Image (spheres, grey):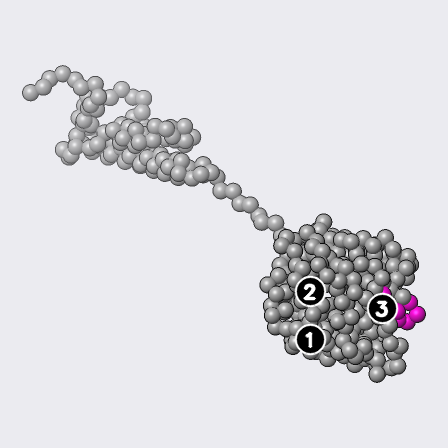
Amino acid sequence: MKTGCDPFRLPHAPPDPAGRRRAHPLAVLLTATSLALPLLAVASDAPEPKPARSARDGAEPKPAKESREARATASAKEAQEAAQLQSLGAKIAESLSRSRDARSSPTNGLVIRVKAPEPPAASAAPRPRPPATTAAAAPGGHATARGDGAGPHLAAAREAGSQGHGQAVHWSYSGNGGPENWWRLKPEFARCAEGARQSPINIRGGIQVDLEPIRFEYRASAFSVIDNGHTVQVTTSPGNTLSVMGRRYELVQFHFHRPAEERVDGRVFDMVAHLVHKDPDGRLAVVAVLLDRGQPNPTIQAVWNSLPLERNEPLAGTAPLELEQLLPVNRGYYTYMGSLTTPPCSEGVLWLVMKEPVTVSTEQIAIFSRLYPMNARPLQPIGDRLVKESK
């Protein structure tokens, strides 16, 4: 049998008068607090229980035998102390639980609420104001013109003839650079969205009048071909002109679109050739020759034979080009005032759309389609413009 005193063992509480062994109050307190040593500071915030004072507090214990009343008083005191210890243990357990939750939370028990910003009210994106005049080079092979169709613009037309499609800003016929977004790409392209006299149009309901015939003075010419990333463009030697409405225009270049951008009474044609001309004042006249599937065209075949292997690298033709073979036999035409069909969509362009199409073979259409399956701007509103048709 071991003797001695274990310093870590608490003495048993004295038995109550009934002979029952009771857990010592200090053992209950030490057991609870040993589980919450890191949070003693939390527990210390709770007010210490004050033991109830009895009539016997402060009095020296009397060795006399306890009376029944004294035992009842002692039992009440012990019950009160047990309740106080139980309350303290509950507070310590609650603090311990909060501590565990705080350690497991990434914000250490702090809940941060961030209010999402109110979304702005939906509204149409502001569009840049169109310039009063446009004198930049016209990508797409067309030369430029003033919005009012008047004034000298020789430099702009010359630049258009030499450069064709501009490459400073990427535009295309689909995706983010497509026609519906042209006006967003550059301030100078604002007219593409805000212009009221844009091309192409669906030619319908024109008035038939006695229009003067177009006098073409085309001859066999040296030429070069370039694939500029938007179309196949042909530049010819000087001296090819047309005269109409009292003005004389010189051919700058011609290029192709698939399908034809223009429609006649809703009809869609396989391709179109746009022959861009300018007069000494820089005014523009574009002849549109509609191309329909049928017999091969010798002039177009000569152009295809001279296609360069690389883009933006011009290749000279090996023989003179017969431009007359690109025109229909019947020279009747529609005419209206419109715009370039490529950025910057400058207005004030005289359009001459030949009524009779010219045939091209299925193979010739397929050659161009391999390069450009679709390079046509969508139709534009005709508005209140007048369209004339030769009888």
Q: Dot 3 lies on which element?
A: strand
First-in-chain label (3 vs 1): 3
What residue does disc 1 label? 359
Which quadrant holds residue 211? bottom right
**Above/below status of 184 relative to 54:** below
Residue mark closest to the camera, 3 vs 1: 3
Give the residue type that dot 3 points to: Glu
Relative to residue 329, is residue 171 drawn left or right? Answer: left
Q: Are marks 1 and 2 in contact (CB under 8 Å)?
A: no
Q: Which mark is residue 302?
A: 2
First-in-chain label (1 vs 2): 2
Q: Nearer the viewer, residue 291 or 314?
A: 314
The secondary structure that dominates the magenta segment is: strand
Give the residue type that dot 2 points to: Ala
Which quadrant holds residue 60? top left
Q: Dot 1 lies on which element?
A: strand
Residue mark closest to the camera, 1 vs 2: 2
Q: Dot 2 lies on which element?
A: helix
Q: Which residues are magenta?
A: 241-247
Give the residue type that dot 1 points to: Thr
Q: Are marks 3 and 1 in contact (CB under 8 Å)?
A: no
At horizontal 72% and vertical 75% (from top left) the residue drawn is 358
Q: Marks 2 and 3, Cα distance to the nearest angstrom?
A: 20 Å
Residue 223, horizontal then vertical, whole percent: 75, 59
Mark 1 surroundings within 10 Å by alpha-carbon count, few (fewer than 14), some (14 through 19), many (20 or more): some
